[in-house]
């Protein structure tokens, strides 16, 4: 039987392009709890190198949307949204892997994801997101419900607004731009880490 996932901290989500391996290395050095590989044109060799690098820091790598890519690369798990493969099907193919589920602003979807075997759930967009400006708004009240798995917040999170999200009850802060566009990525990761101490 799988042990419950216990994660708390910064959930780094990779940006598109631009010296990705070096930027990921800096984020790992700064201290992150989880790393999501997100790409419209996945590079298997690059992903395998990221998985190898992250293992050195004991950080699980999650692949966004692509179950088969997660399996091929040796990643720790996969994150699925409403248009992707079902969580139940993913669980059958990846019995020991980490399954994450996008729940947008829908508690009912979160309950369904848990029944299908999700190891963590994500609500968002918490704030207006530069990556997905049309995303639905997920109010902070969603994080007040206690779930048996970690709950991630995503969407427009910055170091300035992050304390309110942690205070609301989020276990993980999924961050792209405010982390990977920082002038010192390792320092920014460490600053996020301090919010959870």
Image: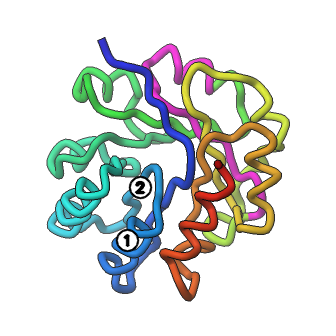
Q: Is residue 98 above or below residue 189?
A: above
Q: CA distance from mark 2 to mark 1?
A: 9 Å
Q: Is residue 41 left or right of residue 195?
A: left
On the image, the x and y values in percent for residue 126 come to 75, 52
Specify whether residue 80 is painted magenta.
Answer: no
Query: How many discs mark residues in the rendered view?
Result: 2
On the image, the x and y values in percent for residue 18 come to 39, 85
Q: Is residue 188 above or below residue 35?
A: below
| Residue 195 occupies quadrant | bottom right
Badge 1 crowding class, 10 Å Cα cut-off, few under 14, some 14 to 19, many 20 or more, is many
Image point (50%, 38%), residue name: 7
Residue at the spot of label 1: 24
Q: Residues in magenta?
A: 110-128
- What colouring style does the render use? rainbow
Image point (78%, 59%), residue name: 127
Q: Residue furthest front?
A: 197
- Front-most of 31 and 118? 31
């Amino acid at each position: 039987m799988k042990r419950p996932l216990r994660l708390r901290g910064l959930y780094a989500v990779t940006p598109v392009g631009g010296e990705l391996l070096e930027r990921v290395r800096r984020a790992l050095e700064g201290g992150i709890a989880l790393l999501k590989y997100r790409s419209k044109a996945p590079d298997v060799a690059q992903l395998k190198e990221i998985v190898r690098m992250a293992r050195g820091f004991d950080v699980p790598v999650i692949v966004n949307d692509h179950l088969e890519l997660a399996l091929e690369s040796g990643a720790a798990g996969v994150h699925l949204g409403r248009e992707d493969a079902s969580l139940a099907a993913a669980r059958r193919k990846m019995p020991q892997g980490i399954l994450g589920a996008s729940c947008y602003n829908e508690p009912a979807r979160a309950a369904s994801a848990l029944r299908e075997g999700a190891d963590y759930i994500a609500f968002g967009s918490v704030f207006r997101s530069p990556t997905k400006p049309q995303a639905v708004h997920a109010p902070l009240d969603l994080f007040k419900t206690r779930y048996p798995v970690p709950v991630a917040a995503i969407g427009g999170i910055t170091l300035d607004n992050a304390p309110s999200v942690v205070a609301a009850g989020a276990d993980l802060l999924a961050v792209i731009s405010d982390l990977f566009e920082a002038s010192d990525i390792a320092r920014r990761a460490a600053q996020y880490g301090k919010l959870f101490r």
